[in-house]
Image (tube, helix red, strand yellow):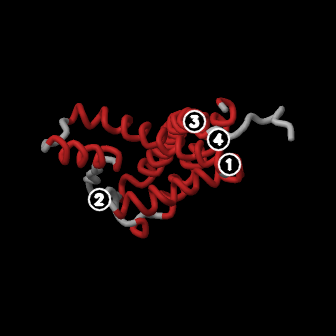
Amino acid sequence: MSTKGRETRSVSRGLIAGSCGGLAGAWCMNQFQSAWSRVSKAVRSQKDEQSSEFAGGQSSQRQSDPATVQAAARLVHGVFGRDLTPKEKKVADPVMHYSFGTVTGAAYGIAAEVVPEAAAGAGLPFGAAVWLGADEIAVPALGLSKPAWESPLSTHVYALASHFVYGLTAELTRRSVR
């Protein structure tokens, strides 16, 4: 049996390639979300201009910290017994996001080495699984967001699309590195 087109399976190579893929995927996911936010904001601004006379007052929608910041705050409070400062919260958000993306990518890279079928679908099933497991189940279960059923469909579509970007990028990067 020839291994000319494919090196032998290696968990350590899978871990490294998957970590690189997860990090790249998290970065691309952030870029996608930033672009989506800019477009959404522009659309909302247009709608607000058209309906400002019917607004009936200011919107006082207070946004809580993202799940990444809340998780970091819990971790710091549990380990050090103190709260995060506003400056630390700004750092905690990307640190938690990229760390989770990298670790999840590493697990995916290992899985792809052990069970090559795990890499089927160009990473889209992987992205969907991360979305379902993290955004839809774990984050609400940990009290880091409201229950999934309380969010509008558009929020779920946005999150799923973001995770498709993550999974696709993670897989393409994993393959390139591997």
Q: Is residue 13 left or right of residue 59?
A: right
Extreme residue toward the bottom, this view: 149
Residue 165 sits above or below residue 4 on the image = below
Q: Amino acid under label 1?
A: Ala
Q: Which of pointers 2 and 3 lies earlier in the amino acid sequence?
A: 3
Q: Are marks 1 and 4 in contact (CB under 8 Å)?
A: yes
* Residue linked to disc 1: 119
- Quarter of the image containing the N terminus? top right
Helix, strand or loop under label 1 = helix
Are discs 3 and 4 less than 8 Å apart at CB? no
Q: Is residue 31 visible?
A: no
The residue beneath circle 3 is: 12
Inspect the image, locate mark 4, and give the three-letter code of the amino acid beneath it: Glu
Q: Earlier in the sequence, mark 1 or mark 3?
A: 3
> How many angstroms separate mark 2 from mark 3 (CA)?
60 Å
* Numbered mark located on residue 56 in the image: 2
Name the element at disc 2: loop
Residue 6: name its quadrant.
top right
Q: Residues within 10 Å of mark 4 (few under 14, many from 20)?
A: many
At x 21%, y 42%, the residue is: 76
CB-based contact (under 8 Å), mark 2 and mark 3: no
Decide: few, some or many residues near mark 1? Use Cα within 10 Å; few <14, some 14-19, many ≥20.
Answer: many
Q: Residue at x 57, y 46 (%)?
A: 108
Q: Which mark is residue 38?
A: none
Q: Classify residue 67 as left or right of residue 127.
A: left
Q: Nearer the viewer, mark 3 or mark 4?
A: 3
